[in-house]
Every structure is written in C-alpha cells, then in structure tokens.
Image (spheres, rainbow, N blue to C red):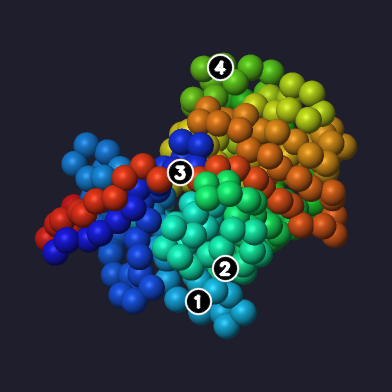
Amino acid sequence: MQLPFSKMHGIGNDFVVLDCRRHRFALDAAQIRALADRHTGVGFDQLLSVEPSRNPSCAFYYGIWNGDGSASGQCGNGVRCVAAWLHRAGALALGDNVLIESPSGPVTVRLLGANEVTVDMGEPLFEPARIPFVAEPAADRYGISVGDATLQVGVVSMGNPHAVVVVRDLADPALLRFGPLLSSHERFAQGANAGFVQQLDRSHLRLRVHERGAGWTQACGTGACAAMAVLHRRGDVADCVWVELPGGTLQIDWKGPGHPLWMTGPAAFAFEGEWTIPDGPA
C-alpha cells in the first residue's frame, strides 16, 4: 500500500505530514518507526496527522507521534508546519486567527506569510502535578541527581513536559550524557524534553534539546517556549526573547502569569512523496 506524505521542517526540526482528513490514521507503532528510519524509511523527528477536529470549536485536529512510535502531546515547530500545510491545501487564509486542536487541547494559529506562522501556545504550567513531575512544593529550581552530578532544573509543561537547565557552555560534552538521562529521569512520570540553555542577554538565548522519543534535535519549538518561560518566571529575561537553536531562531513572547505565550517562526516544505507501508513488524 502506498502512503502519500509531505516532508516539512521548522528550522530543521523535521516532520512527515499525513492528510487524514478523509481517511482514518491507521499506522501502528512499528510502521511509524519504519517510516521514521533515516536509512530505510523517510526519516523524521515527529509524524503529524491532519484530521477532522474532535472539538466543534476547532477547524482541524493534528496528531503527533515521535520517531519511536510513542504519542506526543504538543509540538511547537509541528503546529507551524500544520498551519502552513493547511494554507497550501486551501484550508487556511493568510492573516486569519484559526483554532486547531492538538492532543493537549486547542491552539490558535495565524499565518503572517505563506511560511511564517505565529502560534498561541497557551500559558505555561509550573505546578509539578500538571507536568507531571515528582516534587512538593512548586519551586523555580529543583536539584535532580543525574548520574554522578546534581543539576539545577526548572520544570514546566507547554502541553508536554520540559526540564530546563541553564549552562555556561552548550559545547560541554557532558550534556551528551545528561540529555538522555534527564529525559528518562524517574521524577518525570511521562519522561521529559531536556533543554540546555545559555543566556546571552535578557533578549537572547541559545538552546539545545534532547527530546523524549526523538533524541537530540535541530530545533524544538516547545523547548524554546519552555526555556523562555522558566527564565522569565525567575525574572532573568524580557517579555520578548529570541531563542537560537542549531537549526534556526524562534521569537517567543510572554508577559507572564495570566497571559498566553506566543511563538513565531518559519515552516518549510521539503518534498512530497509516497511510502510503501511494509508488512508485519518493522
């Protein structure tokens, strides 16, 4: 069976997008892993399915799956790609605010250009139980034992769980070890995206992210939101911050508690194709 797809990316965070508006999404975890394989499949960080909305207030629904076949609650670069994909499909006009449904709930998207999208990512959640993260009470920093080190970590949910660590040097080889260990740490019941952030000034950050279910990535939109939110809560950054990731830069705007956080950045089409769905386990 042939599966048509679009290959897209948001500043290097890459996706396969499936049109499931008329046909039910039917891939199992083994087939998702086979499609994600960068040697024998198509390759992606996340798979996105565009589907009819479950919520009558939303125009569409999008599902998110990691390369290991596990489901994800939110993806900042992914939602921008979904918006650009819908625009090219004739379902989203430039300048319109449109509510679309993610696995974590509705989000508002607005196309600033054919490939430039701003997204209302909602208000960051810091309560440990809502992340979920084992801690009592809530705090700006938590000491977490990772291997032979104790890291000072900020935790937040942007529709998915994040751990944020401020570092002096993003090239420190120790981060390669800390990232996977932090992503799978037992205090995060559902795992976490581990972000390591270097602050340049109050409006500029640099970031590397190890995503749960996907590993090190060129960019993580929710990770950029999480890093800004954690530092903003500590009073360390301004209301508008540029976050530089290996694949490019995102603009994050947040005025603080009681306000939604907005993420702005590009979405790009790479190519269209068809993939032959393999029989049996991959």
The kind of residue on which mark 2 rests is Ile
Image vertical order of residue 198 relative to residue 158, above or below: above
Relative depth, front residue between 89 and 12: 89
Looking at the image, which residue sits at the far right? 235
At a point 66% along the width and 64% down the height, the residue shown is: 97
Q: x%, y% of residue 58?
A: 58, 75
User: CB atoms at circles 2 and 1 under 8 Å apart?
Assistant: yes
Q: Earlier in the sequence, mark 3 or mark 2?
A: 2
Structural distance between the alpha carbons of marks 2 and 1: 8 Å
Mark 1 near mark 4, Cβ–Cβ under 8 Å? no
Which one is earlier in the sequence, the residue at label 1 or at label 4? Answer: 1
Q: Image check: 277 left or right of 197? A: left
Residue with the mark numbered 3 = 268
Q: Which residue is mark 4?
A: 171
Asked which secondary structure carries label 1, the reply is loop
Classify 10 Å Cα crowding around label 2: few (below 14), some (14-19), many (20 and above): many
Q: Which residue is mark 2?
A: 100
